[in-house]
Each structure stands twice: as C-alpha cells, then as structure tokens.
Image (cartoon, rainbow, N blue to C red):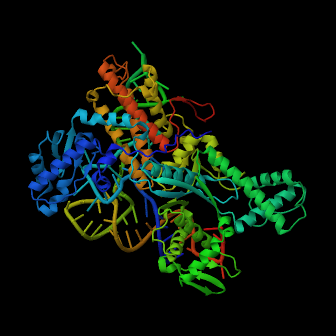
RNA sequence: GCGCCUGUAGCUCAGCUGGAUAGAGCAUCGGCCUUCUAAGCCGACGGUCGCAGGUUCGAGUCCUGCCAGGCGCGCCA
C-alpha cells in the first residue's frame, strides 16, 4: 500500500510563530493558547497593572483550566508573586482584578478563584476566530518554525539483517517515524537513517545457519550451529540459495563460499525487512552499512584519532579507551586480544560520521535494552572532542502482546517472538502504528489484541477516524466538497453553545500540542490530544442530532448558523486529519467495516 | 552489588518547567434509536498517586531512604 500521507516540503510560518518570539512562546502558555491575540492583550494589561503595583518584572503564565467553569484562560501570577510581595495571593489577585480594564483586555469577565487564580472568559467572537485560523492554514495548521530549518538526524529501527523485524522494531519504526514527523512539523529538516550491522559475528552465525539449512535442503545431514538462528525463515533463505546456485556450496567449506552465502542471506533478509517497513509506511533517507566503515578505512582512522588523545592504553593484550573519564561506568575495550575490534569502535566511528556529515543534532531511537551503550558511545565521542550530550537518545521499553487475557509469545517463522508483519497483517497498519505510538516510550507497552481488533469507538484509532469520517459525512450530506467550506462568509460569533466553545478551544490547542510532542519526542501526546478532540467532536455531532435536537444541528435551516457550523466541522476535520497524517495514519472520509478484521477505507 | 526505566481507579494509561475538588479509555451499573450513520451519546460508580521522611504558601510532580517489577552491567552484538 502506498503511503498516502502527503509530504509537505515547504516550511510554513504560522502567524503565531511570526508574532511571538520563541523564548516567550515556550514559557508563556501552559496548556493552551486560545486565542492567542486575546491572551496577549491580557498579558499586556496585567503587566501594566503589575508595574503600577511596583513589580518590575514577572513571568505571566497562562493555562487553560480543565474545568470550563474556570473560564477560557487563567493565570497564577498572583500566586507566584505572593512571596515577594509578602501579601496573600488571593489579595493580590483581587487587586489585579479590580484594576483590570475588562474591555481593554479583550475579555468578557474576570474572576478571582481558588487560592488566587485569575480566570478570564473571552467573548464568543474571540474564541471562534480559531476556526477561521484553522481553515485558513489548512494543511499547515499545527506547523511551526521553531526548528528554523536546521538539520536533525533521526536514526531508528537499525535492525541487524539476521531475520524478520519483530515487535520491538515495529515500536521503534512507528515511534521514530512519528518523532521525525514531529520535528518536520516544527520546522526541522529531518534525515531518517537506518544503520545496518552487516559485519561481525552475528553475520557469521547467520551464514553458518543458512549453510546448514541449505545442505539439509539438498538432503545432507547437517546440524545448525549451537547458537544458530532457529527460525523457519532461515530455511526460506536456504531454499532461495538452492534455487540460485544449485549444489555449488554443498561440499565447499571455504571462506569464499561462506562469504557468498552470507551475501545472499543478507540480500534476502534486507529485502524482506524493506518490504515489511514499506508496507508499514516507513521510509528512510539513508541506509548506512557498518561494513562501509571498514571498507572506507573509518574504523582504522577512528582508532588512530583516539590514540592521539592519549586516552588509549594496552592491558591484557587488548586496547582500551578511558571512557570512565567521561562518565562511563568503566573503561571499554576497543580492540580485543585477537586483534578484532569490539562493537564499540565502529559505533564510535559511525556516530562520528553523523557529526562530520554536519548533523549537530542527532536523535537515536533504540530499545532500552541497549541503554548500556549510551554512555559508552558518548564517552568515545567526547574523547574525540564532541559535546557531552551528543547524540540524544529516545529509549523505548519492550512490547508485550495479549489476546484473550493471555500473552502471545511465539512465532514459528521467527523462532522467537511475534513478527511485525504477523501483527499488522492481523490488525491493520493504522492500528499497529497508533498503538505503538500511544504510550510514552519510557513505558512498557501492552498491546491489547482484543482492543486492537475491535472496530467500534472503543478502539482509540477508530474513534479518531470515525470522528473524522463523521465530519466528512456532514459535508456529503450538505453536497459540498470539504475544500469548498472556507468559512469566509460565516459569522463565527454565533458559535456560542458550550459544546461548541469547548470544541473550538480544543482545536486551538493543536499547534502547541505538536510543539510539546516534538520537544519531548513524545508522539503519545498527539494521540491523547486526538482522542480528546475526537471525543469532543463526537459529543458535538451527537448533540446536534437533527431529530432530537434540531437547534444544534449543523445542517439547520438558519443560514447563518449553518455556515458557521459547517466551518466548525471543517476545522475539526482539518485538525483530526493533520494529527493523523502527522502520525502516519490514514484519515478516511468514510469508514467501511471489514469482514476479516482488516479495515477498509475509501477516500 | 552497581546503573537506567517503571510503580496513579478492577484493567490499560495521561498528568508538560510543582498550582484550583488527581483525569481518560476499557470494564461494571443506569438512561437514550422517526438520526448530519446508535460502529454512537449522556450519566453514575470507582483512587492512602508503591511506602516513609524532607523542601514549599502549595507535592502525583522536586530531594533522601526503602519496597516491588523490567532491562543492562563481556576482549557478545
């Protein structure tokens, strides 16, 4: 299936990004920014009042209260000033509220609440302006330019070509791709890279395993090596070899023959991984081969450069690097007693190329079982003069699959855990991607097959997709293409029902959600947001049931309301679509229930 | 033994640089179909935030110690 996600190459500067300097934007808002203009007016008014009260400088933070009765936006500035002013926060808040010119601050009401919060409520028109902004920005809504076009590399998956991709790789593929997209959406120029460990002992073991299966396939009684690869796929690779070369290597134990077998195996397995990743809709800009480091002399060059630092020493026949000087728990061997380099050395050489290729920011997405290598690699790079925190790491915990309350463990084909393909063929690519993204990387992931196979709104993926499809169904009913709804002539201030206000404020949150998710490399933030927004959209949609509640229906006879509500539906559809697109998940115009558990969608 | 991650409702999880009565989904229970698709909506029930101290006007969030689980501690990758 081709990746339907449009690729936006141009970088867009939103109006908001242009208006607010980056530093202030980061600290200024907590949960929301709706609507920006209004918050800025309040900020200015409060700053002036604080000046009158003798406060030279104070950070005025806004947040969107969880409870709608607390208004549209609130600030805790009185609480933060309590200590320095030696007055109770409540008293300070009362003072500010009394001095505030409500009209000039652009709000309808201000209230002091709780321990000293100032709660503001906007006029309906101010809230609704977010709808116009969403529609106007369309595919660019949610994009910002805080990355300023700088280069960043995201390295992920990086599986050895020794077998099919398993679920850990799948989580990494989904996470890495989403993190890369988040960076693109926030103005970074992203390079997606996959590093292949195609040298070393595991490759030898693979070649020996294939050779054994190859000879078995030709009727010879041969045994797998002790630590050999057990999966069925090794037999497929061996069968492929038989097809290609017949019995050429049946009695040939030479290194040349083994090299040829290894090359064949790597080619086949890489092709299989590429197929799996392609169907999983993950693409890379570059595949970097470990073997190229050796071929290009970079491993030798790296050890040479390390020696020049004076941090290298010989002990027990091996060559060591003083990585403990840079925070590693102990020094590490670079070259073994037998003259072979350990994995550490090409790892350092590889990461050095990232720096030398110009990437001043690199994010490595890896399984947390590799966290032991983090300090080591960083130490090696620091020895060569690179900065201490380079590269950044996103380490994700393991995946567990449960079906009917029981853990699913085995895959005959892989000889171990379930493969990525087995999973997404059963539940669909959209569901698999979403489930891998909906938990923070730090957390263990329980993949609930029962929920994944459910095709109702209980399944969070479908809940979001249904909400999107519902908006599209309104457009169809109205006889309009989505793009025909531009909201231009609509009087949005008529959107004053509580469910509408809440929904609009949700939509206004999206750009900040994307910023935050990108900053924290946390796609799950987007998932949570989409589920919440989809829930608000579904509530609004159902509240407007034309039979039971005709006064809230979108397609009402009142032309003004109809135009405004169509615009809102359009804004909802845009935000849900943008969020899903960002996560690499389809935003179908119509949901069609599949017979076999796989979802079919029409567009 | 040392290091990293995790511990929040029956289950799966949010909770961003400490801020208002700790939130969501699932499950359970109770309402609601002449529909812009009920593949749904509305409501209720449910929590000593692992434990014990500390910092603070204020702690799920920060600090210390302990307990439990996962992962890692190789001249393996």
Say which of A450 and B51 sits in front: A450
Give the quarter of the figure containing the C terminus of chain A. top right
Instruction: List x then y, in percent, for residue A437.
Output: 50, 49
Determine whether, in the image, residue A368 is placed left or right of residue A62: right
Is residue A563 something that shows in the picture?
Answer: yes
Left or right, A177 with reference to A559: right
In which quadrant is the N terminus of chain A drawn? Answer: top right
Q: Is residue A231 visible?
A: no
Tell me if residue A574 comes above or below residue A61 in the rendering: above
Q: Image quadrant of residue A77?
A: bottom left
Q: Which residue is rendered at x = 9% and y = 54% of the image?
A: A52
* Image location (x, y in percent) of residue A40: 23, 46
Image location (x, y in percent) of residue A292: 67, 65
Question: Residue at left 65%, top 67%?
Answer: A293
Total marks shown come to 0
Q: Is residue A96 left or right of residue A16?
A: left
Q: Position of residue A132 (x, y in %)?
A: 33, 33
Is B13 in front, or is A421?
A421
Q: Is A452 drawn above or below residue A166 in the view shown?
A: above
Q: Residue at x 44, y 22 (%)?
A: A480
């Amino acid at each position: 299936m081709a990746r339907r996600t449009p690729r936006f190459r141009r970088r867009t500067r939103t109006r908001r990004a242009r208006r607010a300097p980056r530093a202030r934007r980061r600290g200024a808002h907590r949960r929301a920014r709706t609507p920006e203009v209004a918050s800025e007016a309040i900020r200015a008014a409060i700053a002036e009042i604080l000046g009158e009260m003798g406060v030279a400088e104070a950070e005025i933070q806004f947040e969107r209260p969880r409870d709608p009765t607390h208004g549209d936006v609130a600030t805790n500035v009185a609480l933060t000033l309590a200590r320095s002013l030696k007055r109770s926060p409540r008293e300070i808040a009362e003072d500010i509220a009394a001095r505030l010119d409500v009209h000039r601050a652009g709000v309808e009401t201000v209230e002091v609440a709780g321990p000293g919060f100032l709660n503001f409520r906007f006029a309906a028109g101010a809230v609704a302006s977010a709808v116009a902004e969403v529609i106007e920005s369309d595919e660019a809504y949610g994009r910002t330019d805080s990355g300023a076009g700088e280069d960043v590399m995201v390295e992920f998956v990086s599986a050895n070509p020794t077998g099919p991709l398993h679920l850990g790789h799948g989580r990494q593929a989904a996470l890495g791709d989403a993190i890369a997209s988040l960076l693109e959406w926030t103005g970074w120029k992203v390079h997606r890279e996959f590093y292949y460990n195609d040298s070393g002992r595991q490759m030898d073991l693979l070649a020996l395993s294939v050779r054994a299966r190859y000879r078995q396939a030709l009727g010879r009684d041969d045994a797998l090596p002790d630590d050999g690869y057990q999966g069925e796929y090794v037999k497929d690779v061996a069968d492929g070899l038989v097809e290609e070369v017949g019995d050429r290597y049946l009695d040939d134990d030479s290194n040349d023959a083994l090299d040829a077998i290894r090359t064949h195996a790597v080619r086949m397995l890489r092709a299989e991984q590429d197929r799996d990743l392609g169907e999983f809709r993950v693409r890379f800009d570059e595949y970097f081969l470990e073997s190229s480091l050796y071929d290009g002399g970079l491993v030798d060059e790296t050890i040479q450069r390390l020696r020049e630092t004076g941090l290298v020493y010989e002990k027990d026949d091996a060559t060591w690097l003083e990585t403990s000087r840079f925070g590693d728990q102990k020094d590490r061997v670079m070259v073994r007693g037998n003259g072979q380099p350990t994995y550490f050395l090409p790892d350092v050489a590889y990461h050095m190329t990232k720096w030398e290729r110009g990437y001043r920011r690199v994010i490595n997405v890896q399984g947390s079982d590799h966290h032991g290598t983090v300090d080591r690699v960083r130490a090696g790079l620091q020895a060569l003069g690179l900065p201490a925190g380079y590269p950044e790491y996103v380490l994700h915990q393991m995946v567990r699959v449960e079906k009917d309350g029981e853990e699913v463990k085995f895959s005959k084909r892989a000889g171990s855990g379930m493969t990525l393909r087995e999973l997404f063929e059963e539940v669909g690519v959209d569901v698999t991607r979403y489930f891998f993204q909906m938990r923070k990387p730090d957390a263990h992931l329980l993949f609930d097959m029962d929920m994944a196979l459910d095709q109702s709104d209980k399944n969070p993926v479908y809940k979001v997709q249904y909400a999107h499809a519902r908006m599209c169904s309104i457009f169809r009913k109205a006889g309009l293409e989505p793009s025909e709804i531009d909201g231009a002539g609509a009087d949005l201030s008529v959107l004053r029902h509580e469910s509408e206000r809440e929904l609009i404020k949700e939509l206004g949150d999206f750009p900040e959600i994307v910023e935050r998710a990108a900053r924290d490399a946390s796609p799950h933030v987007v998932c949570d947001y989409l589920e919440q927004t989809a829930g608000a959209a579904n509530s609004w949609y159902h509240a407007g049931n034309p039979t039971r509640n005709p006064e809230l229906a979108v397609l009402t006879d009142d032309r003004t309301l109809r135009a405004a509500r169509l615009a809102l539906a359009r804004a909802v559809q845009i935000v849900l679509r943008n969020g899903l697109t960002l996560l690499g998940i389809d935003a179908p115009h119509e949901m069609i229930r599949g017979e076999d558990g796989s979802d079919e969608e029409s567009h």
